Image (cartoon, rainbow, N blue to C red):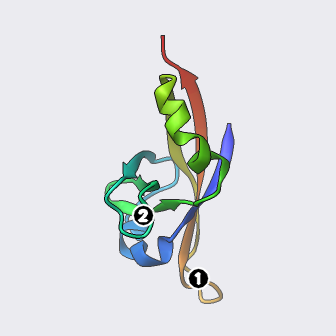
Amino acid sequence: MYFLPVHGESHYQQALASSWEGQPVTLQPEPDNPYDPAAIAVIATEKIGYISRGSWLHERFPELQKHQQRIIARLLSINGGTEDKPSLGAVLEIGIEKLR
């Protein structure tokens, strides 16, 4: 298992607030993203942020898909939402499984 923070989540606070720990998420490439054509969105029920550009997963994502490896992701934790830290943040748990 690997662990990665969700980035850009400050733009998706409402969606993140309706998400829960343990929730499965989908990692969805966004080739039409005007800021990063290699962007990978993190989608719970709705988009909650992105995989950080330059992270190991962002760099290896095309290779993993090409070699028919399935990426299993879920929300490991949601933090913040307190007086001291009003914005929510999230950490993903990532597993990689070889498809047969």
Query: How many marks can you see?
Result: 2
17 in relation to 61, above or below: below
Mark 2 Cα shell of 10 Å, populated few (<14), some (14-19), many (≥20): many
Percent position (x, y) of residue 71?
Answer: 51, 34
Q: Which residue is mark 1?
A: 82
Q: Which mark is residue 26?
A: none
Residue drawn at (53%, 74%), measured in percent from left and top?
A: 88
C-alpha span from label 2 to label 1: 18 Å
Q: For the point 68% across and 42% down, which residue is it?
A: 2
Check disc 1 and give the amino acid type: Thr
Residue type, label 2: Ile
Find numbered disc 2 in the image and state the secondary structure of the residue it sits on. strand
* Quadrant of the rendered image containing residue 47: bottom left
Asked if 95 appears above or below 41 in the picture, the reply is above
In the picture of the structure, the residue carrying the numbered disc 2 is 48
Q: Quadrant of the N terminus?
A: top right
Tell me where residue 84 appears, x and y as whole percent.
65, 88
Q: Which is more N-terminal, label 1 or label 2?
A: 2
On the image, the x and y values in percent for residue 52 come to: 58, 60
Residue 18: give x, y in percent of width and height: 37, 65
Determine the image quadrant of residue 30.
bottom left
Label 1 crowd bin: few (<14), some (14–19), many (20+), radius 10 Å: few
| Residue at figure coordinates x 42%, y 56% from the top left | 41
